[in-house]
Structure formats: structure tokens, C-alpha cells
Image (tube, grey):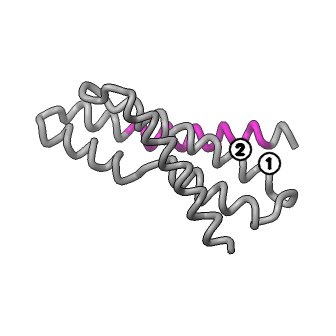
Amino acid sequence: MRYLWVGLGGAVGSMARYAIGGRADQSAFPWATLGINLTGAFLLGLLLTVAAGRVSTEVTTPVAVGVLGGFTTFSTFAWEAFEHGRRGRVGLAVAYVAASVIGGLVAAAAGYALGRSLR
């Protein structure tokens, strides 16, 4: 049954990402993808910290793997970085990769810190 909930959560997360990404002009810089991935990293850090030992994996797995996994997107991030580099925007591609990776780690740590303060 958990697989079904993960799948449904993934559908919800993917639709939310699509709705947000579809409203943003990402031709100059992929702000929507960056914001989505940083938000997802923050929420995952928060969720897993707050839920640890309090909420069953029957609940956290569909939210973490399904909703947040469907919401965030590594493949789009990789493609956008590649495309900017391929089009000669190497500096922009490097900045995007750095902002995504470093920002994602900082966002996850911030979610963890907030979760610890709420416990």
C-alpha cells in the first residue's frame, strides 16, 4: 500500500512543480527550478527532523519520497545547466550548479535547524 501512497504523492508533487515552473520565464535563468529544488531540500530537512521518532514511516515515506521527490527535479536541473553551458553561457551554468548544490545543502541544513528548534 505504501507504494500507492508514494505514487500518489509523487503525482501531487510533480503537478505542483509543473504548475510553478510553467508560470515562470526561465530563458534567462532557471529561477523556478532553483526555487523548487531549494524549497524541497528545506522541506525535506524540516520534515525528516520533526518526524524522526514521532511520525511513522507509513506517513513520512509518501511525503518525503512521493510529494517532495516528485516536486524536486534533478533531471531538469542537469538539463538546464547543460543547455546554458552548450549555448555558451558557461558562467551562468557554473553559477546555477553552485547555487543549486550549495544552496540545497544550506536549505536542508536550515530545515534541519528549524526542525530541531521545533522539537
- Name the residue tied to disc 1: 50
Q: Which residue appears farthest toward the bottom when viewing the image?
A: 1
Query: In the drawing, does residue 107 fall left or right of residue 78?
Result: right
Residue 64: % across, % down = 64, 56
Prevailing secondary structure of the magenta residues? helix
Few, some or many residues within 10 Å of mark 2 (<14, 14–19, 20+)? many
Which quarter of the picture shows residue 59? bottom right
- Which residue sits at x=37%, y=27%? 24
Give the magenta range.
98-115
Q: Quadrant of the C terminus?
A: top right
Asked if marks 2 and 1 touch (Cβ < 8 Å), the reply is yes
- Which residue sits at x=64%, y=43%? 43
- Which residue sits at x=52%, y=55%? 11
Q: Secondary structure at mark 1?
A: helix
Which quarter of the picture shows residue 1? bottom right
Q: Nearer the viewer, residue 12 or 92?
A: 12
- Name the residue tied to disc 2: 46
Few, some or many residues within 10 Å of mark 1 (<14, 14–19, 20+)? many
Vertical relation: 22 (above or below) 72: above
Vertical relation: 71 (above or below) 36: below
- Which residue sits at x=64%, y=48%? 44
Residue type, mark 1 in image = Val
Q: Nearer the viewer, residue 66 or 99?
A: 66
Residue 54: % across, % down = 87, 57
Q: Secondary structure at mark 2?
A: helix
Gap between marks 2 and 1 measured at Cα: 6 Å
